[in-house]
Amino acid sequence: KRAKALILFLQEFRSPLVYILVAAAVISLLLAHLIDFYVIIAIVLLNSCLGFSQHYRAEKAIQNLKQLLVPKAKVIREGKLKEISSHYLVPGDILIVGEGDKISADARIFEATNLQVNEAVLTGESMPSDKFSAILPAETSLADRENMIYAGTEVVRGNGKAIVTETGMSTELGKIAQAVQQLQPEPTPMQKSLSAFSKKLTAIVVVLAIIVTGLGLIVGMGKFDMFLTGISLAVSAIPEGLPAVITICLAFAIQRMYRANALVRKLAAAETLGCTTVILADKTGTITAEKMTVTTLYTNKKFLDVAELKNPDAETMLLLKIGCLCNNARLEAEKDKEGKEKEYMIGDPTEKALLLAAKQFGLDKSQLTQAEPRVIEFPFTSERKLMTIVRKRKDGKGATAYVKGAPDIILQRCGKEIINGKVTELTVKRKKQLFSAYEKLAASALRVLAFAYKPLSEARAKSQEAAEYGLIFVGFQGMFDPPKTGVREAVQQCKAAGINVVMITGDSALTAKAVSAKIGLKGKVMTAQELDKLSDEELIKALDKTRIFARVSPEHKLRIVNAFKARGEIVAVTGDGVNDSPALKRADIGVAMGIRGSDVARDVADVVLLDDNFASIVAGVREGRRIYDNIKKFTKFLLAVNFDELLIIIAALFARLPLPLLPLQILWLNLVTDSLPALALSTEPAEKNVMARPPRKKEEGILTGMAPFLIAAGILATITTFAAFMLYLPHIEKARTAALTTAVLFELFFVFTCRSNKPIKDIGFFSNRLLLAGVAAAASLHLVAIYTPLSMAFKFVPLSFSDWLKIIPLSCSGLIIFEAEKLVRGKRRKK
């Protein structure tokens, strides 16, 4: 850590302007101008220390956030399933892996179900590798080790269990020194744009500084004085710190977003969020709480309220049993610090709800699974929309397939139904009745799953076709998943901010419509079947009114993202599964779920929601708009007040007057006015109307519409400083002290008008206390420089009370004039 801090400190000296100042200091030393030498070195060190302190804090903030991106791993320790940070994996751990997991250690597979792993990071093979538990020869090449999984690779299908063999740098990936998890802090588009602008401006300023130096020599000024003046003007006028201030601003902004449960993985996302025009949000877990509770059952031609159910019949118990046995969630218990046994659950929220419903009526999963051991699993996928687990029968004669899934899919595969203990044929008429029962549940905003089973012979126990067709229908379980707190308000905020919210779900249109009504989302519902019938052009037109997409797959989601982008929208999209990765990558802002999201989805996302809440996306958009506004404010401030020194010197040379500001005075002005106020502006609170205005256009530059303001401010600052200088001539030292003090105070007062396009009275003078502290600190430093022995180094003289009575009105002129213009403009708008 100390080495990193030292490197960061030394990087503060890697600026061309620092090199120029050091060269000037060396020349001053060689010419025996010791005061100039010491002052220049002191200014370089002080400026570097200020820069280091800010960069160090920003770097520390980013490093702390990186730690939050470490994947979790599911392991079995002491016979219990636990979820731990992947940092704590050790050889010998039993690792549980499933679709979407990023593997964090090398491990030997001993159980696999349709397991496929993407090993491109290790082998270069783009196609997923099938994995088995078979024994292979020791000399088998890395790419052919089908019984091993490796750190850095990703599970794209199925699930399995493996024993950890290597961790950390001992893994295959560690051996070739590749970073498994690393944030790449690339420059944002705004940083690149402003960096390019700064370079162009630097070239112009350097040319002007050379011209000023030449003019000074022509009119008979001293060579050394003009040399230092040229350097000082270049250092003062060039906004070399602009890209750095933006980096610091973004770093602290992502800290604020983290506190609002939005973890930004890429700096560019922080600024892009502010111009989002469409948010495509998953219903389950993002809009709804994903705190599933089974509230209603349907079996034996009856609707049953779980809360009022006392003596369930055999069919109801069978329905609950299938929910328990076709299930990968687990209920575990461990002792807390006080020795009391505490239960906890691990698994998918839907499966947890099914397990709890079964437990409520005395069904214990561990006892059931011991009686009927698992034979094989055919996992759920977004394409299949069903899941099957085949288990041995208690009597050992054959097996039973337990199946759950989307009602329409399950009903298609059922040929029979169990009613009052008898298995009867499932007629077309009865299927319609069952479908009506399902629609009734879905219309009540319930998430509905259908359950079925099928006896199998031992010979056909591992046949997927045998296990999933010709099923016996048992019933439905309806789960209530309430909207998350604050989602309805967040949807209304989006509407006011000109952002369209679109809900995407794999659930039925009826369930989606019922949930959308609860959160105040209005618009047309489109199902996957309707979507498939539309051409791309027709879909783009349909997006005008469509606000809900139901029964969609990840492939549909990608198509919807592409359609919105084709309309010129800035799209934020949420995703949690491995199949959501293409849509997350394609969107302008990919938003992954921090709780229920897969490691793969989090890896490709720009933002991770730590609470999986839609309201956190909206908070992120608000912060994104605030970031952009604040960057624009301090950019406006730095550019508006950095050129008056140059113009004053040019004016004095043409008028054949002495230099109004000496080189060291110019450097002092740059030091006290540029750093603290500009950084404080980056913490400016969000404007009251920040979410009551339409999104800005992505192509809008940070400097758009700023030219009149910058020109007016530059001219006014030059006039006031030059006026203060002329007031005290021919007393040259007092004239320079007055001119510099006027310039310092002008900038410190002027920073307040850069806070907003609204008058100060509307935003509150004391609403940014950091700015007040920064201005007070800068003013105090200047007073110290005037009224202490330090004044000798800068050739300052003390100012009397009457002097201040002249200087303060001049210094306030910029603030007064620009605030008056805002008031006049506001009155005109009201008219």
Image (spheres, rainbow, N blue to C red):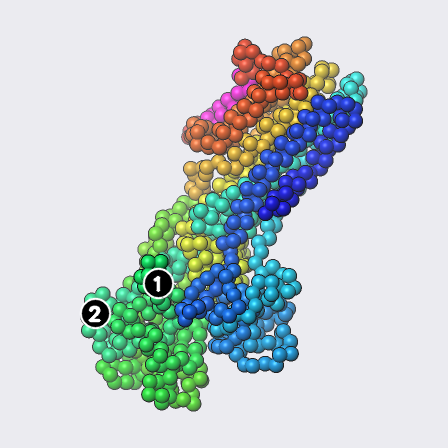
Image location (x, y in percent) of residue 62: 54, 48
Left or right: residue 522 compared with residue 179: left
Residue range corresponding to the magenta coloring? 809-825
743 relative to 137, above or below: above
Would residue 428 be visible to someone looking at this image? Answer: no
The dominant secondary structure in magenta is: helix
- Whether 322 is among the magenta residues is no
Secondary structure under the numbered disc 2 in the rendered image: loop
Q: Nearer the viewer, residue 689 or 386?
A: 386
> Looking at the image, is mark 2 or mark 1 nearer the viewer?
1
450 relative to 718, above or below: below
User: Which quarter of the rendered picture does the C terminus lie within?
Assistant: top left
Residue at screen point 44% across, 63% down: 83
Number of the label disc, if any, that sits on residue 31: none
Residue at screen point 24% across, 71% down: 303
Image location (x, y in percent) of residue 348: 40, 66
Give the amino acid type for the residue marked by disc 1 in the picture.
Lys
Image location (x, y in percent) of residue 331: 35, 68
Secondary structure under the numbered disc 1 in the rendered image: strand
Left or right: residue 793 compared with residue 706: right
- Distance (Cα) linking label 2 and label 1: 32 Å
Q: Nearer the viewer, residue 796 or 93?
A: 93
- Whether 815 is among the magenta residues is yes
Residue at screen point 57% across, 45% down: 59
Q: Are marks 2 and 1 in contact (CB under 8 Å)?
A: no
First in sequence: mark 2 or mark 1?
2
The residue singled out by tag 1 in the image is 335
Give the amino acid type for the residue marked by disc 2 in the picture.
Leu
The residue singled out by tag 2 in the image is 309
Numbered circles on residues, count:
2
